[in-house]
Amino acid sequence: MDIRIASQIAQTHLLAKKRQTLVAMLGVTFGIAMFITMISFMQGVNQFLEDSALDASPHIRLYNEVNTQRPSLIDQLYPGKFNVVYHQKPKDELARIKNGMTIAERIEKEPGVLGVSPQVATQAFYNNGPIQLSGTISGVEIDRENRLYKLNTRLKSGSLRGLESNPDGLIMGAVLARKLNVRVGDKVTVTTPIGSTRVLRVVGTFGFGVGTVDNTKSYANLSTVQEMLQKDPSYITDIHIKMVDPLQAIPFGQRLRATYGYYTEDWATANTAILAGEKIRNVMTFVVSMTLLVVAGFGIYNIMNMTVINKIKDIAILKATGFDGRDIIAIFLLQAVFIGLSGGLLGLLIGFGLSYMLSITPFDAGDFLSLKTFPVIFDPKYYVMGILFGVITTVLAGFFPSRKAAQVDPVAILRG
């Protein structure tokens, strides 16, 4: 049969029931538009959370883990022969990395390494009059730290240069500064675990949008924190590493651990909860989105099935005049393809419009999240997935009724 004849018959069927055709198209349109909007928004949220986690934490953290569990000397020499006292008090073991600066310089020369920041991290108490809060303070070389975390883009007030020019300078998390009720230029008394106290001046505040950082952390000069802990200038407790490719952090961290004998923690391990949540959200998004498309497909199936029933006498006449089963299938498949393509393209346009409106909608996240609008990702693959799934669903929804129509016995129908 000539495809032009089949398309003319399909067009006649579609135009004869305009409202029915429009409802079928809108089913596809709504399903694909919601699919595009949901997946673009949820993937944008996932990307924002992942970027926030990567921005606020190193790809690899090299540190000396202080182990309080150590076997007894008697138990080592004479295992099982004596009653050994367990739960011994831990040794006075330092968390320092021996030759930390030398190790940092070696790592920095490795291929694929974006930057390295040796630092001294310690717990601290921040005091401002009657207010006392616990947190952490990291002694860093600010230029190296800025290269890793782009602190200059995270500043809420002050400047990084103020830390270089002031040996008693302090750059504080924005939420922590608000809780202490301090601003740039104010002084804060910082107390370390060993009891030493030092008055530092706030020269800036920063915000990563991560509560565990903005609520507790501050930066000071490396030498300042070493002096507060009464340690020598070679004292280093952590080495933070950023890779050009974050996916290379896991094997590279394992190699560093084998080379230097210190513990390493990669970004995937440190952010396990965020990555697990991302997987759950992805599954939920695809399940809901595919459900919308499948429901739209069932709607089209019902409409095509009703079309077959309404056109049963026309089908009998076509078969009586020489049309075979394949011709009948082609007529109804052309109707399904038209509905799928028309509804799918309209759904893509509406989905893009809704996603764009969402992406420019103001979002007030306060000081906790660095968001001004809702995060949305415009990825072409989602639009390709939407139109393909929409067309495939409609073709399948049209195939089964058309196969049923192809099996009609024209003699039985015409006899009534």
Image (cartoon, helix red, strand yellow):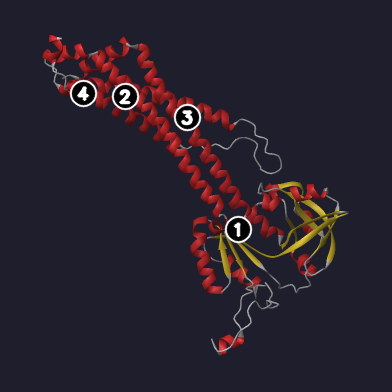
Q: What residue sits 35% from the left and 16% below the top?
A: 21
Q: Quadrant of residue 336?
A: top left
Horizontal relation, residue 352 to residue 404: left or right? right
Q: Quadrant of the C terminus?
A: top left
CA neighbours of label 4 inside 10 A, class few (<14), some (14 to 19), many (20+): some
**Which of the pair 381/102 is nearer the observer?**
381
**Residue indicated by mark 3:** 34
| Marks 1 and 3, the one that precedes in the sequence | 3
Distance CA(mark 4)–CA(mark 3): 32 Å
**Residue indicated by mark 2:** 301
| Marks 1 and 4, the one that precedes in the sequence | 1
Classify 53 as above or below 68. above
Q: What residue sits 65% from the left and 34% below the top?
A: 363
Q: Nearer the viewer, mark 2 or mark 1?
A: 2
Kind of residue sitting beneath label 4: Lys
| Tag 4 secondary structure | helix
Farthest-out residue, front: 83
| Tag 1 secondary structure | loop
Discs 2, 1 touching: Cβ within 8 Å = no
**Residue indicated by mark 1:** 58
| Marks 2 and 3, the one that precedes in the sequence | 3
**Residue indicated by mark 4:** 404
Kind of residue sitting beneath label 1: Pro
Horizontal relation, residue 110 to residue 367: left or right? left
Distance CA(mark 4)–CA(mark 2): 12 Å
